[in-house]
Image (tube, rainbow, N blue to C red):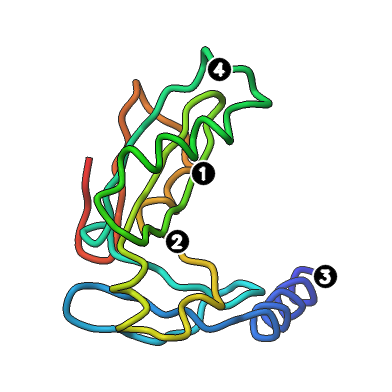
Amino acid sequence: MSSLVLRLNSWLMNRCSSTQWMIDRQRIQQKPYQGLRPRTLMARDLCLHFSLSLDKIPAGKRGLALQQQLLLLSPFTEPGHYVGWQGGRAQLWLWDQAALRERLPACDRYSIVPDSALSLAQPLADGERLISGLHGCEW
């Protein structure tokens, strides 16, 4: 029975893979990844990261408060952003969307994820986390 499960899993992984563009300062690589939708994976060094505590703001108004913070924090005329919520805390990544569009014109059609945002699913250990990205690790 386990061989059937392994074959089924392998078949699903082969059928459910999409294209991923990995972008860093020097190059853009196109590789498959195990997901249903194509995406752009952006290197951490192309992003600004902010950890914002919005605990004191009612949950229904946090999205609007985050949009206001995005306007205040972004040095870019056309910012792109990604948000990961952890309770009342927003992990916010910002990047220059216009510069990204010059390098990869199709980027507006796909979701853009900073590589360090992939680690949000892992639990924190005493408020710390080791994040593996496209170019090494960060603590």
Mark 3 vs mark 2, CA separation in Å: 37 Å
| Residue 132 horizontal/vertical position (percent) | 30, 54
The residue identified by callout 4 is 57
Of callouts 4 and 2, which one flags the residue occurring earlier in the amino acid sequence?
4
Q: Secondary structure at mark 2?
A: strand
Q: Secondary structure at mark 4?
A: loop
- Tell me the crowding category of disc 4: few under 14, some 14 to 19, or many 20 or more residues within 10 angstroms, Cα based: few
Identify the residue at horizontal 64%, vertical 23% (top origin).
59
Identify the residue at horizontal 62%, vertical 26% (top origin).
61
Figure quadrant of residue 97 = bottom left
Above or below residue 27? Residue 72 is above
Mark 3 vs mark 4, CA separation in Å: 51 Å
Mark 4 vs mark 2, CA separation in Å: 26 Å
Q: Which residue is most to the right?
A: 1
Q: Secondary structure at mark 3?
A: loop
Figure quadrant of residue 47 = bottom left
Name the mark nearer the viewer: 4 or 2: 4
Mark 1 vs mark 4, CA separation in Å: 24 Å
Name the mark nearer the viewer: 3 or 4: 4
Q: Are marks 1 and 3 in contact (CB under 8 Å)?
A: no
| Residue 105 horizontal/vertical position (percent) | 41, 86
Q: Amino acid at mark 2?
A: Val
Task: Using the image as rendered, state which of residue 62 and residue 116 is in the foreground.
Answer: 62
Q: Are marks 3 and 2 in contact (CB under 8 Å)?
A: no
The residue identified by callout 2 is 113
Q: Secondary structure at mark 1?
A: helix
Q: Amino acid at mark 4?
A: Ile
Residue 101 as seen in the image, left or right of residue 39: left
Residue 41 as seen in the image, left or right of residue 48: right
Name the mark nearer the viewer: 1 or 2: 2
**Mark carried by residue 1:** 3
